Amino acid sequence: MKVDDLVADLSQDRPRLGRSSTAERVADILRERISEGFFPPGRRLSEEAISEALRVSRNTLREAFRLLGHERLLDHQLNRGVFVRLPSVEDVLDLYRVRRVLEGSAVRRPPSPEALALVKEAMRDAERAAAEDDWQRVGTANIRFHQALVSLNGSPRIDELMRQLLAELRLVFHVMDNPRAFHEPFVERNRVLLGLVESGRREEAAAYLDDYLDHAEKLLVHAYEPNR
Amino acid sequence: MKVDDLVADLSQDRPRLGRSSTAERVADILRERISEGFFPPGRRLSEEAISEALRVSRNTLREAFRLLGHERLLDHQLNRGVFVRLPSVEDVLDLYRVRRVLEGSAVRRPPSPEALALVKEAMRDAERAAAEDDWQRVGTANIRFHQALVSLNGSPRIDELMRQLLAELRLVFHVMDNPRAFHEPFVERNRVLLGLVESGRREEAAAYLDDYLDHAEKLLVHAYEPNR
DNA sequence: AACGTAAGGATCGTTCAACAATTCGACAAG
DNA sequence: CTTGTCGAATTGTTGAACGATCCTTACGTT
């Protein structure tokens, strides 16, 4: 390996260098707490309380709030504070509109082997978890499956968008009574979809996926009551 | 009109209420300046100088920086400051990947009449401007055309994404020598594309669009030199 | 000529304290 | 039941301060 190649390889790690301001780490913590439901949708996050608990200044905390606000995880209302976002039914509809576009275009494209491998691994993990009745893990594996599916597009920006979108979907699940029952039936569907993609029957895969998403959306909207 | 209907109607304006913190207005100003090239790509934005010029505190300005950073207009480097983003060639490639997905799925969908009307209006404006040799206006009309095209998807989130994407593309144009020459040949192509969409020949439109974007991407990458 | 070190200045990161602006709830008056 | 009014609580914004980090320059070493 030549020197030029070595430095080219190293330069991939460049982004990891700058990554650590207090505000961003605070945002990481909050993002995780929100995603796991510790801060449920609708909950107000007090600047004073949280800045005190995390031992950071209010200013730094506010920077973190801005970051999460842009990811649609927090809702910033002027002079009232920030709230964990409570998605409306329209939001759910739009999330699925975007999913149809992103995942649809993903399955229509000839998949790269590496990306496809990730999809298969998520698939396997979901099946293992289902066999063990670990529905928590089935849920996260299902999410990984679709994240990997979208990555077939080969676009970092689309990957990033999908990450945000799925984080937002998690908010929706936190509002529902029984998110577990929601993930179960889709393990089988994932397998079928993956089979179609692998065998190169792309249009069939796209059609199947559309049906898949229609179904999921209907279930979700029906069970979803963002009113209190 | 009953009272209930009145208040329901009014509640549409709700979002407009909260929208005006100093940080956001500062972000608006900076966004405009960047978009018009006043702050060229690569330029460093000094916290002290700008906060002084705009008469806001450094803390408030930093909040604005965070906002624009998330829109990929600014590049925030730890302990070094914020810079107007200078897109790489890889960025250009990815921007066109996303365009292919968003615009492709837009033309495949049966268009709503209202959305289509906006596309046609942008088209007409571009033609008028071209007739008057006003290439500045041709450029913005061209951008409006594609923004409207994407809005055929009917998704607010996708509209928002496209807005950001086009803002990023504007950065690319600011780096090039002669952005004008770049917009000219596409007026004709826009017309053909619009014709195909209007007559419902969606697959043909999608194919034409793919070719369109391939061509534009090639031109752009070839002319683009983000080195100095 | 290439490299290691050191010093100084500039700028950012973060904190803190203070005050103005706004919201909210309670309570009194009509 | 609706409409003012008041006060407490919280956010919005500011300005100053100090440590941390980076950049530049200079100087000496190899």
Image: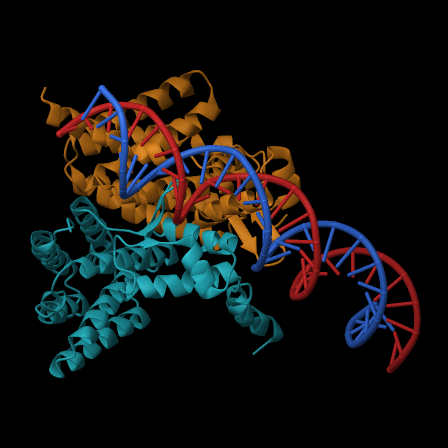
Chain colours: A cyan, B orange, C blue, D red
Q: Nearer the viewer, residue A171 or A167?
A: A171
- At a point 28% along the width and 59% down the height, the residue shown is A167
- At a point 23% along the width and 70% down the height, the residue shown is A140
Instruction: Confirm whether residue A48 shows in the render.
Output: yes
- Residue B23 vs A103, above or below: the answer is above
Which quadrant of the figure has residue A41?
Answer: bottom left
Q: Nearer the viewer, residue B126 or A72?
A: A72
Which quadrant of the figure has residue A78?
Answer: top left
Could you tell me which quadrant the N terminus of chain B lies in? top left
A136 left or right, relative to B183: left
Residue B103 percent location from the top left of the image: 28, 42
Q: Nearer the viewer, residue D28 or A23?
A: A23
B171 left or right, relative to A71: right
Residue A25 percent location from the top left of the image: 47, 64
- Residue B29 vs B219, above or below: the answer is above
- At a point 45% along the width and 37% down the height, the residue shown is B21
Which quadrant of the figure has residue B61?
Answer: top right
Instruction: Confirm whether residue B113 shows in the render.
Output: no
Q: How many marks?
A: 0
- Residue A118 vs D4, above or below: the answer is below
Residue A58 percent location from the top left of the image: 49, 54
Residue B24 percent location from the top left of the image: 46, 38
B42 left or right, relative to B6: right
- Residue A4 vs B101, above or below: the answer is below
A189 left or right, relative to B58: left
